[in-house]
Image (cartoon, helix red, strand yellow):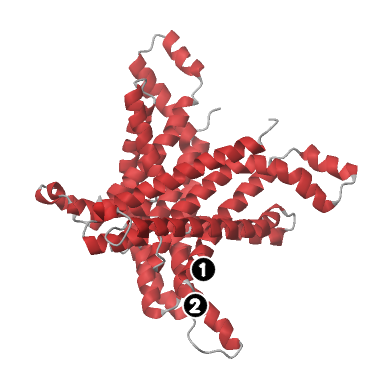
Amino acid sequence: MDFTIMATSFPKLLSAAVITLKLLSLSLFFGIFIGFLFAILRLNKNPLINKFAYGYSYIFRGTPLLVQIFIIYFGFGQIEYFRSTFLWIVFKEPYWCAIIAFALNTGAYTSEILRSAFQTIKPGIIEAGKSLGISNRIIFYKIQIPVAIRQSLPAYGNEIILMMKGTSLASTVTLMDITGVAKYIISTTFKPIEVFIVAGGIYLFMTFLIHNLIKYLEKKYSFN
Amino acid sequence: MEILSFGKTGWGDELFYAALMTIAVSVTAMLIGFFFALIFTPLKLSNNKFLNFIGNFYTTIIRGVPELLVIYLFFFGGSGAIMYVASIFGYFEYIEINAFITGSFAIGIISGAYSTEVFRGAIQSIDKGQFEAVKVLGVKKHIQFLKIIMPQMLRLAIPNLSNVWQITLKDTSLISVTGLVEIMRQSHIAAGSTRDPLLFYSVAALIYLMLTFLSMKLINKLEVKYSRGF
């Protein structure tokens, strides 16, 4: 056990945690919108729209995240259209490519979580709203969405933790997040166990924080 | 399409063997995972606080740390650890472990943590009366487990184990960083030498989709088999 390596790598890994958190929060932010959009499309009665949304979530949940990042980062640069338009500003940056891949991926999982939450809303609640003469639009925004969000909190908490672990794949497209820096330190010092303990500790601490935040929210918004 | 054909000019056969490698790693990792689950599930269910702590320690750490980090630990640390053990026995040459073994072991440990949770949940949701009934009937310990607890546990565990299988299958893509030639690595090589990453990574995605689709079909059959009578 080499404690000096642990002590010197700790500040480096901690500053890399900022990138991990940035990647995580941005992809979750975009992912929620994608998730909502596809959850609503999934509930649409038109079979074509419905199947499209199902196909989206099936493809993104059935393939590894690594493939998705590589297709977006290495693959899209090959298409002339992407290189000649303003899109190239986004797609030449590994940072934005990683965020796009993460957002699309977490969006697919979020859409499944929200869909099942929408489907398990008791019909009585909606009927109560209707019998009170509330318009369909307001029922959707003021009754269905809040109830669905509350119901999907525990599953979404798991998804946040999975996504946080997923951000480690950003290191494969040259980004220096916690895992990227950890790999760099390991390959220069050859002290894998020490670095693993420090980097793993930071990740575990973040998992712990997310876990407790979700627990707190669940308690705050529980039905009584 | 010629680029994907089987034979000397195409990458079809290479990708096919790479897919077989992915399946081999996934199956090995899943089995290693079951082995770990066999050790850690009883620990998690035990009343002894210390044993319980060890069980929880394993599942919490593995499920809270990115898979890639665990793989790097094994990739860089694996041969070091083996060499350390060998040096105790007086062998000082450089030892390189096979990428297949390192990879399957790393993924296996990850998969084991998920399997442990699944088995724990399944055993805990078996009706208490079942445990009491076997005790009252004086059934031998190992027969208790094999004939009464295990069949009921499997029925409850199979749907969740199919999730673990999917996670394990997708995690094997991460082993490509260690240089083992599985689907991702092969597509990376092919993309590099043909300068066509879009095509090859899309093909890789398609192969993974096919693998997940086929394995789901297979597992659904198992599910039907084990839920007879319910």
Instruction: Using the rendered image of the protein, determine whether residue B77 is visible from the camera's viewpoint.
Output: yes
Classed neighbour count for the residue bearing mark 2: other residues with Cα under 10 Å, few (<14), some (14–19), many (≥20): some
Q: Give the label, 1 or 2, closer to the camera.
A: 1
Can you say whether B97 is above or below B187 in the image? below
Tell me where residue B195 appears, x and y as whole percent: 21, 60
Of residues B23 and B123, the one nearer the viewer is B23
Classed neighbour count for the residue bearing mark 1: other residues with Cα under 10 Å, few (<14), some (14–19), many (≥20): some
Of residues B154 and A88, the one nearer the viewer is B154
**Residue on which disc 1 sits:** B101
Q: CA distance from mark 1 to mark 2?
A: 11 Å
Q: Is residue B178 left or right of residue A76?
A: right
Q: Residue at x 44, y 27 (%)?
A: A118
Quarter occupied by residue A52 = top left
User: Mark 2 or mark 1, which is nearer the start of the sequence?
Assistant: 2
Q: Secondary structure at mark 2?
A: helix
Q: Is residue A38 left or right of residue B106?
A: left
Tell me where residue A214 appears, x and y as whole percent: 48, 43
Q: Secondary structure at mark 1?
A: helix
The C terminus of chain B sits in image quarter:
top right
Tell me where residue B47 appears, x and y as whole percent: 75, 54
Outermost left residue: A84
Of residues A164 and B169, the one nearer the viewer is B169
- Which chain's residue wears label 1? B
**Residue on which disc 2 sits:** B79
Quarter occupied by residue B158 = top right
Q: Residue at x 29, y 53 (%)?
A: B4
Indicate the amino acid at tag 1: Ile
Instruction: Using the rendered image of the protein, determine whether residue A1 is visible from the camera's viewpoint.
Output: no
